[in-house]
Amino acid sequence: MTQVDELEQAILARAERLAAEYRARAASRRDTILREAAERLRAREQHEEQVARALAERSFRQQVQASELKLQTHLDRVRWNLMQAVERGLEERMRAFVAERDTYGDWLATLIVRDAGLIEQPRLRVEANAHDLVLLRERWAAILAALPEGREAELVEEPITALGGVRVSDAEGRVRIDDTHAGRLERLRPEIQRVILERLLPNGLDTANLFNG
């Protein structure tokens, strides 16, 4: 073998080694590219899954909130209708009570005496509607006699607008007890609403835990 042949063989061997190195590097690079591509794809899929889950959860929450709002609106409407029905019923009962002249007149007198004991002022004013003023004038002497010691009362002749009952105040009008039908109803309204809600939601539920447990 001549030196030329040896040189050619050395060159060929060198070329083969380089080719093998390049093939190995290419394979490694290909594996790296595939691995990175797979990781990016997996990351993108995870991101898309998270986005889809977030969108689904938001859509679910929106549907729940819409249902809660719809239910709350319905409950408010039912409660309002019930309140109106109760108030109409109380008004009818009040009108029937007013028609019981003697019993109703005695009740008015009892209200005045009671309210006079609650207002710690010596001079009081009593107001009533035109119908009740007639009943009170008939009983006024007895009412004055029944007032707590140290109390005087004046029956105001100017009638007020009321279904029934009286308003009792001190002479200056700074302290007043509204025992008219409307005034008593206003004080009772929170209790009436509480009872109505207990009937609507007997277990004390609210719209939130109706959906969430």
Image (tube, grey):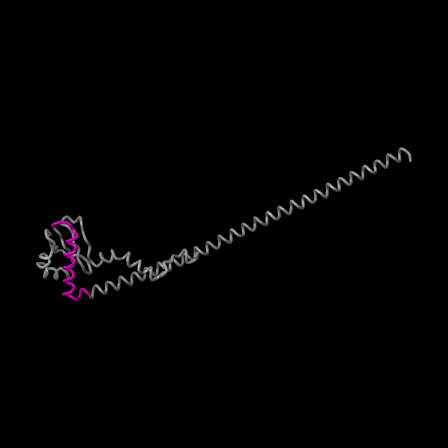
Residue 53 in picture, x, y percent from top left:
53, 52
Q: Residue placed at 21% from the left, 59% from the top?
A: 181
Which of the pair 21/94 is nearer the observer? 21
Q: Residue placed at 82% from the left, 38% from the top?
A: 13
Which of the pair 55/20 is nearer the observer? 20
Residue 113 in picture, x, y percent from top left:
14, 56
Left or right relative to 191: residue 172: left
Q: Residue furthest right?
A: 1
Q: Is residue 139 above or below residue 169?
A: below
Q: Quadrant of residue 144?
A: bottom left
Is residue 123 one of those drawn in magenta?
no
Quadrant the C terminus occupies: bottom left
Which of the pair 150/170 is nearer the observer? 150
Q: Residue placed at 24% from the left, 58% from the top?
A: 185
Left or right relative to 142: residue 209: right
Quadrant the N terminus occupies: top right
Magenta: predominant secondary structure element? helix
Magenta residues?
97-122
